[in-house]
Image (cartoon, grey):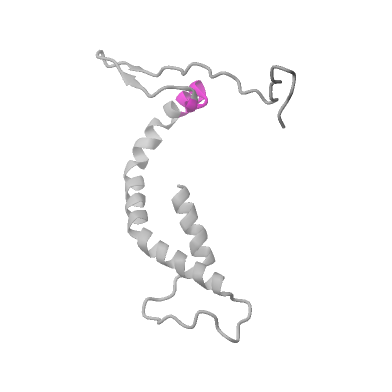
C-alpha cells in the first residue's frame, strides 16, 4: 500500500510526458522558477515509475484476486487483532502435529532506564 501511495504522490508531482516527445533543455531560460534539482527529481521519478509500473500492475491484479477472500475472513481477522494487540509482543506461529497453531507471547523485556545511573563514586557522565 505504501508503494502505491508513493507512486500516486509522484504522479501528482511529476506528470509523465508522452513517449514520443523528445526531452527539452534541463532548465528553460525563460522559466526562472525551475531549477536543475527540480528537473533532475522529475526525471528520476519518471524513470522510477516507468520501471515500477509492471510490478504495480501485477500487485493490483493480485489484490483484486484475493479481495473476496479478505472480505470473507475480515471479521475474524479483526477479532484476532483485538485479542493480540501488538504483534511485536509475540513469537512466530508454530503448527503442532495435531494441526493446532500456537502463538507464544514473548517474555517481557527489561525496561530501559531513562536516567543514567550514577557510577561507583556517585558521578553521572553527561
Instruction: Please give the name of the residue rendered at 37% of the width and 54% of the height, measured from the top-left corner.
Output: 56
Quick check: 125 left or right of 18? right
User: Residue 16's image quarter?
Assistant: bottom left
Q: Residue furthest left?
A: 97
96 lies left or right of 112: left
Pinpoint residue 49: horizontal percent, then vertical percent.
Answer: 41, 62
Q: Is residue 8 magenta?
A: no
In the rendered image, residue 61, in percent from the top left (x then y), is placed at 32, 51
Q: Is residue 82 above or below residue 14?
A: above
Kindly tell me whether residue 72 is visible in this rendering.
yes
Magenta span includes 87: yes
Along the line of sight, the residue nearer the viewer: 107 or 103: 107
Mark yes or no: residue 15 visible: no
User: Which of these two is toward me, 106 or 12?
Assistant: 106
Give the quarter of the figure containing the C terminus.
top right
Whether residue 13 is situated above or below residue 33 in the rendered picture: above
- Magenta stretch, residue numbers: 78-88
Amino acid at each position: 500500500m505504501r508503494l502505491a501511495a508513493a507512486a500516486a504522490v509522484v504522479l501528482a508531482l511529476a506528470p509523465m510526458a508522452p513517449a514520443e516527445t523528445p526531452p527539452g533543455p534541463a532548465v528553460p531560460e525563460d522559466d526562472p522558477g525551475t531549477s536543475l534539482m527540480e528537473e533532475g527529481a522529475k526525471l528520476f521519478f519518471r524513470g522510477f515509475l516507468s520501471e515500477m509500473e509492471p510490478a504495480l500492475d501485477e500487485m493490483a491484479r493480485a489484490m483484486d484476486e484475493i479481495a473476496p477472500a479478505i472480505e470473507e475472513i475480515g471479521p475474524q481477522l479483526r477479532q484476532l487483532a483485538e485479542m493480540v494487540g501488538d504483534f511485536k509482543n509475540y513469537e512466530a506461529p508454530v503448527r503442532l502435529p495435531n494441526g493446532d497453531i500456537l502463538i507464544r507471547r514473548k517474555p517481557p523485556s527489561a525496561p530501559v532506564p531513562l536516567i543514567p545511573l550514577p557510577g561507583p563514586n556517585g558521578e553521572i557522565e553527561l
